[in-house]
Amino acid sequence: MEKKTEFPNRAIVANMGFNEAIVFENPDYDAAIIGVDSIGRVIYDLEKMTECLHEEGMSYEDALDFIGYNTVRSLPYMGPKAPIVMRSVDDGDDVPEISSVIGFDSDDRPVYDMYRKMDADGCDASVAEEKIRSIHQGDENAYILLTRHIKDR
């Protein structure tokens, strides 16, 4: 019988080869992990993070305040491999290449799903990444590229 892990998404990230990835621990937000970016940063879905805290008894408003104050504000102090907190695309967002933008990080940089881009354009990973890079004139700090999924969104 297989042993059940307390943090299944963290285990998936580690099994992908990202053993050194920085993850949130208190609260852990394991259910909010959606994937890993091109340089090994764990990507969390803000809505799912809010749901994690709501399940622990917080109101949605208090959960958003908690995440903003205690989690997002700590990201700059976690270094270059800090996790990414992504909010999903909203109707009011100005979104380039809508077929592959799935959200925005806490600095409002678009988060692209490379696999969605590959499917939409019928191309391989290197071509998809080059197309995304060209949208931002080669500035790799202007966007986030989700390259490894934990599970379907």
Image (cartoon, grey):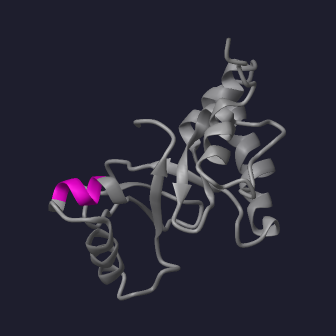
The percent coordinates of residue 99 (x first, y second) are: 24, 55
**In the depicted structure, whether residue 22 falls above or below residue 33:** below
State left or right for residue 59 relative to residue 90: right
Question: Main SS type for the magenta part?
Answer: helix
Q: Nearer the viewer, residue 60 or 151?
A: 151
Residue furthest left in the image = 122
Determine the residue located farthest toward the top in the rendered image: 1
Q: Which one is nearer the viewer's eye here, 40 or 153?
A: 40
Q: Is residue 134 above or below residue 80?
A: below
Q: Quadrant of the N terminus?
A: top right
Residue under the image location 61 percent in, 27 percent down:
51
What residue appears at the point 35 percent right and 60 percent down from the top-left corner? 114
Q: Please report the residue visible at 71 percent of the width from the left and 72 percent of the height from the top.
A: 80
Q: Determine which quarter of the picture holds residue 6.
A: top right
- Left or right: residue 77 versus residue 59 is right
Q: Which residues are magenta?
A: 116-120
Return the x and y of residue 75 as percentages of the image width and height.
Answer: 74, 62
Q: Quadrant of residue 153?
A: top left
Q: Is 119 within the magenta?
A: yes
